[in-house]
Image: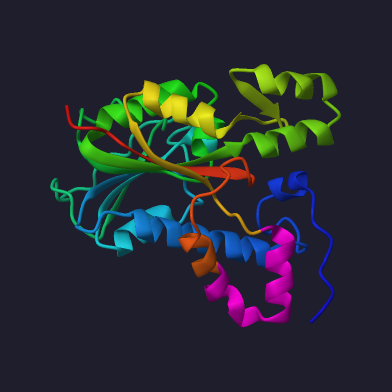
Amino acid sequence: MPARPPEPSIASLRDAPGDGDSLAQYWTFYWAVAAAQLARWLPLKPARVLDLSGATSQSAAQAASAGHSVLQVLDPHLGGPRVNGRPRPLPPRPGAARKPIPGTIRKVIAESSSLSFLADASTDAVIAEGRVLSRHLVTESAVGEIARVLRPGGRVLLSVDSLTLGMALLAEQNYWAHLSDVPSAEVVLVPWPDGTITRCFGAEQLRELLTEAGLEVEWIRPRTVLSPSTVEHVLTGSPRSLTRLVRTEVTSPLGDESLGIHLLASAIRPHP
């Protein structure tokens, strides 16, 4: 077996897959875990699914392939397409069926933080993957809209940047004064080297956010528990171990939510 590589810094994990090859195997593992977690979470019966995860996410396609009717929101403010330079809903195609069709995806260009084009309690499930809620700095408003459009008993799956990642980014950029304020801050906004800003959450902050929106938290966990160095070490020595690693990650008991660069949460809108 090759020697175990040194543990990469948390801040080095901020880069998207494809920005470098040093963690290519870890990112392959990461997205395989994300797909497995979504597969376990999706409703068992055909449902109306709202996907807010953005154009680069595979969650809408995965939900549709599982037999669900998916409405995919492409937010132009988060890198999605624009219509005539401005965000607005795409008109329905002539002759398109009004009733949701299982196994299909309908796309709409709109702000994912304002779902005014959807009626109350009109959706069975909402997927907000790809850290989309961390990119909405007023996350309370976005989560409130998600709770509004969910039917009683409907569920939301979401991922956000963790405080672990946020603190690593602050340290990487020598924001020591800001770093010392993190433990007492109610809202943690973190600048990235590319000039963007995201909102980072601890497990309790995320739980409070969802609860105040009227949702019941089912669980909160890190996206991955296995460290990048462990994943790289195992896959370098045995590339066929990916399936086993993913199964280990997905079936592992819920542990310390503070681990990892991203937090994953599931919540339900309770019946009145």
Kindly indicate the quadrant of the structure image that contains residue 37. bottom left
Q: In the image shown, does 32 or 69 lie closer to the viewer?
A: 32
Q: Is residue 189 found inside the magenta-colored segment of the image?
A: no
Dividing the image into 4 quarters, which one contains the N terminus?
bottom right
Seen at 56% across and 42% down, the residue is 257
* 29 horizontally vs 37: left or right: right
Q: Which residues are magenta?
A: 227-245
Q: In the image shown, does 153 or 48 lie closer to the viewer?
A: 153
* Residue 260 point in image, percent of width and height: 63, 47
Q: Main secondary structure of the magenta part?
A: helix
* 148 horizontally vs 8: left or right: left
Dividing the image into 4 quarters, which one contains the C terminus?
top left
* 169 horizontally vs 243: left or right: right
* Residue 173 point in image, percent of width and height: 83, 32
* Residue 112 point in image, percent of width and height: 41, 33
Residue 117 visible: no
Seen at 46% across and 30% down, the residue is 207
**177 w.r.t. 226: above or below:** above
